[in-house]
Amino acid sequence: MGCLRCVIEQVARARTWRVRPDRAARIEANPRSTPRDWIEGAGWKRLNLLNRALGEFAHGSTRTNWNVARGALVALQANAEADEEAQYTGRTHALAAMIFIVSVECAAWVDSFSRQLGEAYRKVIRVDDVGADRAIDALMNRAWEKRGTPLR
């Protein structure tokens, strides 16, 4: 899970360079920039809960409570309250969500080389832009709704 924190940060960095290169250049030039700056630059501020929960798994200090962080990942799932198995699938959901986000961002970058290649890539990964945007937006909305979920 700690590795996924690096993934979300680096994908946010790549996305910021793709969609807002001016902002990316400012963030890159700032020696005090944080991963949160990249996430916000990517337009993913609503994913802060996911980033913070993954961050808890990245640290092994005595103040870290992995059960609470796991609970935050559970809360990010659709219908988590109604699904009895959701308490066991929070980490799996986080991994699947990050794989999906990386795949969608890769498709967007491939488009910058060739729209035809991008379309072929989307066929291979079985993703269309409208469905992908809808799924990512739903995840961000759930994360925003649950932003008050404690992590410590």
Image (spheres, grey):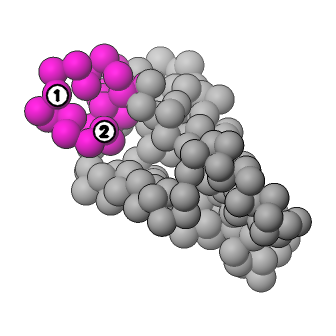
Q: Residue reaching furthest bottom?
A: 22
Say above or below: 106 vs 88: below
The Cα–Cα distance between marks 2 and 1, rounded to whole angstroms, is 9 Å
Identify the residue at image location x=41%, y=61%: 134
Nearest to N terminus: mark 2 or mark 1: 2
Q: Which residue is mark 1?
A: 83
Q: Secondary structure at mark 1?
A: loop
Q: Residues within 10 Å of mark 1 (few under 14, many from 20)?
A: few
In this picture, residue 112 sits left or right of residue 61? right
Range shown magenta: 67-91
Quarter of the image where the C terminus is located: top left
Residue 15 image position (x, y, % from top left):
69, 63
Q: Identify the residue under disc 2.
A: 77
Amino acid carrying label 1: it is Asp
Q: Residues within 10 Å of mark 2 (few under 14, many from 20)?
A: many
Residue 92 vs 43, above or below: the answer is: above
Q: Quick one: which residue is furthest to the right in this view?
A: 113
Question: Which quarter of the figure has residue 72?
Answer: top left
* Rendered image quadrant of residue 39: bottom right
Do we see residue 30 in this rendering? no
As drawn, is 82 to the left or to the right of 148? left
Residue 67: x and y in percent read 34, 20
Q: Which mark is residue 65?
A: none
Helix, strand or loop under label 2: loop
Q: Position of residue 9 (x, y in %)?
A: 66, 49
Q: Are marks 2 and 1 in contact (CB under 8 Å)?
A: yes
